Image (tube, rainbow, N blue to C red):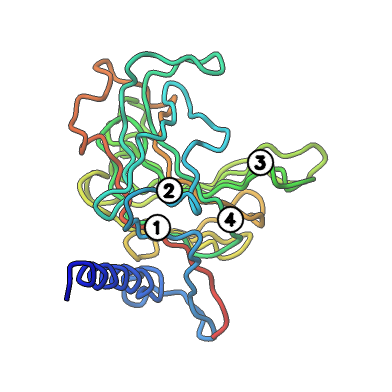
Amino acid sequence: MNHIQRKSIYLSIVIYLIATTFYAQETPTFADGENPMPADKKWKLVKNMSDEFEGHKVNEKKWQISGQGWIGRAPGLFVADNIKVKDGSLQITTTLLPKPVIKNKQTFTHGGGFVGSLKGMKYGYYECEMKANKTFMSSTFWLINDTSKEKDCDKRVTELDITECVGEITNKAEWMKYFDQSMNSNTHSRNIPEGCDYAKGSEKAGADLGGKVYDDFHVYGVWWKSPTEILFYLDGKLQSKVKPPANFDIKMHLRLVVETYNWNPVPEDGGMTGSKEDRTTTYNWVRSWKLVNK
């Protein structure tokens, strides 16, 4: 067997292992007795909204990494170079910009990252395995509708935050006290078009991680069951059920975002003193599922 033949066989084995790893998962991640699947249904993986991140770069047939018109919340600018696929994971690293950047009459001093699914879906189960960064910047996993593709009353905003957290709390407000050791979930209804009868507001939920958000990986999941039923899961266990402020019945897109919050400001030292590993949010995988008939 020559070198080319051996290389071809090796590549075939690698491709097979990747494929079988990706498609071996038959259900979302549930602890024993926690799978809410009806007896006449089964879970089906939605491939164009799922990724094991086994390659060497972001699959831009699935994900958009420049913000889709959103450049970030000052002082955090979305920087595509901060996003890598490496060691079987998606990594978004926080950075201090070499010099301040002025965009849209705002000053940006830090770099984050935006990864958004090109495809959207209505209802289903969404999950990721994530470890947060240790900085004051966020680590998040959430869904939102694309108002540019909607019309009439569906141009309202529906946002489903599966988890939002920070590694360093710089705000002494009581509600922020455990934001670095919790799964912080929310449902938002806003920007209601004039003449449309939808409530505006938020309904939130939470769960204790038992440690800091950056200590280890956790599986964050949500079952968007119906327009009025949102069920949040942590490490495969049901944590809470929420009825959103208005019907969630518009297709939404996934978001994996590292940004700055105006309610958790930059610390005096700039917040970027840690190692690259400390400054990186890591997603081992993202999976989306829908229920189909058996």
- Given residues 171 and 89, the one toward you in this image is 89
Which residue is label 4 attached to? 120
Residue placed at 54% from the left, 32% from the top? 70
Amino acid type of the residue that numbered disc 3 sits on in the rendered structure: Lys
Residue 286: assigned label: 1
Please indicate whether residue 67 sits to the left or right of residue 163 in the image.
Answer: right
Q: CA distance from mark 3 to mark 1?
A: 30 Å
Residue 237 lies, with reference to residue 270, above or below; the image says below
Q: Quadrant of the C terminus?
A: bottom right
Residue 249 lies, with reference to residue 157, above or below; the image says below
Q: Are marks 2 and 1 in contact (CB under 8 Å)?
A: yes
Q: CA distance from mark 1 to mark 4?
A: 14 Å
Q: Position of residue 3 (x, y in %)?
A: 18, 67
Which residue is label 3 attached to? 200
Please report whichever mark, 2 or 1, sits nearer to the chain's N-terminal start: 2
Please report whichever mark, 4 or 3, sits nearer to the chain's N-terminal start: 4
Q: Position of residue 231 (x, y in %)?
A: 48, 61
Q: CA distance from mark 4 to mark 2?
A: 14 Å
Residue 101 occupies which quadrant of the picture?
top left
Which element carries disc 1, helix, strand or loop? strand
Residue placed at 40% from the left, 69% from the top? 28
Which residue is label 2 attached to? 141
Please report whichever mark, 3 or 1, sits nearer to the chain's N-terminal start: 3
Amino acid type of the residue that numbered disc 2 sits on in the rendered structure: Phe
Please report whichever mark, 2 or 3, sits nearer to the chain's N-terminal start: 2
Please report whichever mark, 4 or 2, sits nearer to the chain's N-terminal start: 4
Disc 4 or disc 2, which is closer to the eye? 4
